[in-house]
Image: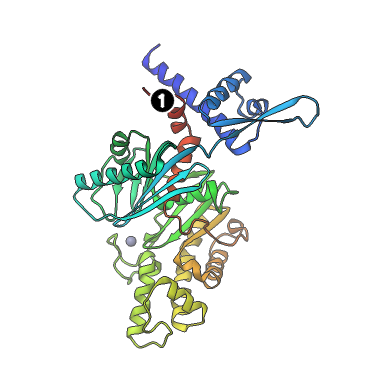
Amino acid sequence: MTHGQIANVDLVKQVNSSAVYRLIDSRGPISRVRIAELSHLAPASVTKITRALLEQGLIQELEHQASTGGRRAISLTTVTRDFYLVSVKLGREELQLTLYDLAGQHHAHQVLPFPRRERDVLLAALHRHIADFMQRHAGTHRLMAVAVIMPGLTDAQAGRVIHHPSYPLAGVPLAQALGDALGLPVFIGNDIRAQALAEHYYGASKDSLDSVLVSVHHGVGAGIITEGRIFKSQGRDVAEIGHIHMDPLGDRCDCGNVGCLETMVADAALLHQASRMLAQGYDSSLAGQALTMSALCQAALADDRLALTILRRAAERLGQAVAIVVNLFNPQQVLLSGALCEAEEIVFPIINRAITHQSLPGFHQGQPIIRARFQDDQTIGGLALVKRALLEGELLQRIMEPKS
Ligand SMILES: [Zn+2]
């Protein structure tokens, strides 16, 4: 066989195995006969693939009474608790590490300051922290992969960082570099896009194939899931709704433009507005308090006029941007993540009104915006990236046929 033919045989194997694994994951417990019907694979192929999956402990057999009575029937389900991964959030001068099993359970968590440094020193430190964490917490667990998520822009397909707001990592093939050093597959991606996928696999948009997650924290971003996948452009990030232009006379944004949504509704922008209004002598229960998003939300919930005004204005602008996204993508579900969810009763109805009035009636389908499930789990996106690699066959193949 030529090299090309060998590559094709491998690819067909990978596609077939992942199709079988995906069916067992989404429809299990499921019989081999049903898998063959749904996948259009020959029964002999299904038997061969499921044998290999069983050997690796990725699936298990369940024996039960057939519904027709008599003979015992055997169904298959995936095994998620025996497989572990480390998810790393390379944040803004902070590193968070979590050990998860594939079912989404936490087993260990660590947060460390991670200061800005020169590139090679930074990479060495990152590797050392992950290796230490693995050694201390992963122990005898079967580690399948490491995921690194981050704010900024990535080329997830190539495993390359395009831009990180805090570190000089532009152009670094991070997945390859860490993968070689750790001896495990490494997947990277943007944190918000990965969180949107986590909400789809495990969270609030589990029942929808098409959803949008809008995240308002330090910045404002979105993750768009279409037909169960992160919407991307040639493997690169999209959905930077924080940089939708809202005000030609607005404040200067980190991106270099002015009047971006982010400069009006991100946490820092809201706190800045509050402190400016307090300095101008507006009456508020926030005067003399430490200004935090939680304090702002609580004041608004207690009917403080200044806090209410700031949150209402932010919700209106956010609603305008979300309505644009709804018009473009017609999602079944829109999720919101961020500190301002603490004032959900104030913020959500305003966003819903904007969606209702500013997007096509058939598009919002009367579905209100809902709170994302993983508000505080900063590393959850990494779990989703590993799950995706498994479902789409890339990681599955490496587990089934480890390269010697
Ligand atoms: Zn901007």
State the image quarter where residue 236 is shown: top left
The quadrant of the picture showing ligand 1 is bottom left
Q: Is residue 382 visible?
A: yes
Residue at 63% over, 20% down:
43
Q: Is residue 247 visible?
A: no
Residue at 29% over, 67% down:
252
Q: Is residue 232 above or below residue 241?
A: above
Q: Residue furthest right?
A: 69
Q: Secondary structure at mark 1?
A: loop
Q: Position of residue 333 (x, y in %)?
A: 56, 55
State the image quarter where residue 280 is shown: bottom left
Q: Quadrant of the N terminus?
A: top left
How many marks overall?
1
Which of the colour schemes (rainbow, by chain, secondary structure, one colour) is used?
Answer: rainbow
Q: Is residue 256 left or right of residue 23?
A: left
Q: Is residue 279 above or below residue 221?
A: below
Q: Is residue 52 above or below residue 281?
A: above
Q: Position of residue 296 (x, y in %)?
A: 43, 75
Q: Amino acid at mark 1?
A: Pro
Q: Position of residue 402 (x, y in %)?
A: 41, 25
Q: Nearer the viewer, residue 307 or 124?
A: 124
State the image quarter where residue 367 is shown: bottom right
Residue under circle 1?
A: 402
Q: Is residue 332 left or right of residue 385?
A: right
Residue at 42% over, 53% down:
192
Q: Is residue 51 left or right of residue 309?
A: right
Q: Is residue 245 above or below residue 51?
A: below
* Mark 1 residue crowding within 10 angstroms, few (<14) / some (14–19) / many (20+): few
Q: Quadrant of the C terminus?
A: top left
Q: Position of residue 98 (x, y in %)?
A: 41, 49
Residue at 60% over, 21% down:
47
